[in-house]
Image (tube, rainbow, N blue to C red):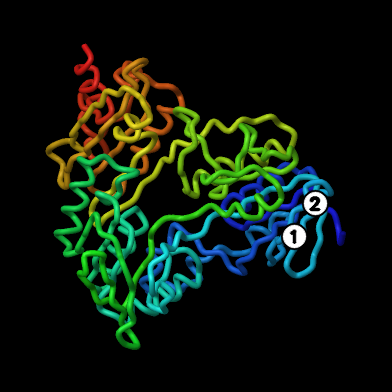
Amino acid sequence: MDRKQDVVIIGGGPAGRTIVHILNAANKDLSITLIKDEPVNVNRCAVPYGIDSKKPIEKYQIPNSLVTDFGADLLIDTVEKIDSEKNIIYTANGDSIGYGHLVIATGSRPFIPPIPGIDNNFITPVRSVDDLALLRNLSCKGKNAVVLGGGYIGIEVAVVLKQMGMDVTVLEILPDILITTMEPEFIASVKQELKQNKINVRTKEKVAEFTEISNNEVMVKLDNDESFKANLVVMSTGVIPNTELASKAGLETSPFGIKVNEFMQTSVDNIYACGDCVEKSSFINKKPVRGEFGTNAVFMAKVVAQNILGSKIVFPGVLNANATTVYELSLGSAGFTEDFAKNSGIDVVTGFSKVLDKYPMIDGVNFILTKLIFNKADKKLIGGSVIRNGVGVAQNVDFISFAIQMGATMDDILKYQYATHPELAAKPSDNTYVFAAKDAKAKIQ
């Protein structure tokens, strides 16, 4: 063994960096090593917005100083083995490092469907700094782009490529785009916005084959024999948790990720895991749920760090609060959608509101549309979606997320006190959450 550290962190994403910062702030004089296999990390959420090369690519990178300036040693290497009995990790470059506490924050990788011809220079996922460099290169040279996947990242990429002058087609294998995060009523508005901006959205479409037809063009063939020519194909087809290292070490895993308890401990007490690589449980029903968001990684990492420092902090589960923009629209959600709740066996009642975002006489006034999901049995809020013009939706989603965390009921929301101002909010009698709760309550009286 070359050396022993109090804490070894495997992974340089938001979870790993958050743990470093919290341990450093605690002033416990802990020896910490963070190991990551990417020399330079990219801000993954910002990759779609970095495709346009108006700003240098460095603006979208995460500086390694966010590790090294906070009391941790940084090792660019790949961990190949964890010996959980001897408390030692082994790297590809021959290092062996002992640990008191180990944190696995190995993240996830793009899911690349097994489509013939997918190993092509014109096809790229949206994940790393190398992906961003290729996206920049190909989008500047070509005219036609095909995006596989109609989730947030796929739609964000499609909008950016269209704004750069490309002809863009989105192919989604599911019945609709954004289906895991948004309500059908709001998805229709997004699709209309995309259509108005001449982005071609195709749902229930499966790609059968990619065929290179020239030195700058590939043919995208569907299983119905229809074809599209593309100079760039973007794979936004989801991610797979990186659990192989943990599994090889004998830790319990599932298709959702590395299994952890409420303290974020794996099946070995002094080994924690957090971020995309972990099996997440829902805050609402405590069952496994997907949730590969950077915010979830940070929330879990905070719990890991505090427990390493000796606290007994419980992670309550994820709510998957999320937000995005599509041209002039901003939209987002937290908790369960109506369909997900029903498929989870919950009897729900929903409330809908359409409220002005300013006083009616103010220039630029527009609507906020809100849908809230309540558990019919106890009237507790379990989910909600918002869509509006402008960029304010994140604050709407944050309210919904916090209300769920606090166990707010329909009646609590009806009574909650809020601010108003002619240019900043609806008139005093109107509130988007109150009106949605009022609509829901009317359905059960």
Tell me if residue 416 can be seen.
Answer: no
Residue 126 located left or right of residue 106: left
**Percent coordinates x, y for residue 403 in the rendering:** 40, 27
Q: Residue at the spot x=64%, y=42% of the render? A: 252
Q: Residue at the spot x=34%, y=22% of the render? A: 375
Q: Residue at the spot x=44%, y=70% of the render? A: 132
Residue 291 located left or right of residue 367: right
The amino acid type found where label 1 is placed reads Asp
Image marks 2 and 1: residues in contact by CB distance under 8 Å: yes
**Percent coordinates x, y for residue 63 in the rendering:** 59, 64
The amino acid type found where label 2 is placed reads Ser
- Rendered position, 171 above or below 289: below
Tell me if residue 229 can be seen.
Answer: yes
The 10 Å Cα crowd at callout 1, few under 14, some 14 to 19, many 20 or more, is some
Toward the bottom, the furthest residue is 215
The 10 Å Cα crowd at callout 2, few under 14, some 14 to 19, many 20 or more, is some
- Rendered position, 370 above or below 217: above
Q: Quadrant of residue 321?
A: top left
SS for tag 2? loop
Cα separation between marks 2 and 1: 8 Å
Q: Residue at the spot x=71%, y=45% of the render? A: 23
- Write down the residue under mark 1: 73
- Write down the residue under mark 2: 31
Numbered-mark total = 2
SS for tag 1? strand
**Percent coordinates x, y for residue 353 in the rendering:** 20, 31
**Percent coordinates x, y for residue 373 in the rendering:** 31, 28
Residue toward you, 314 or 17: 314
- Point out the tag, 2 or 1, that comes first from the N-terminus: 2
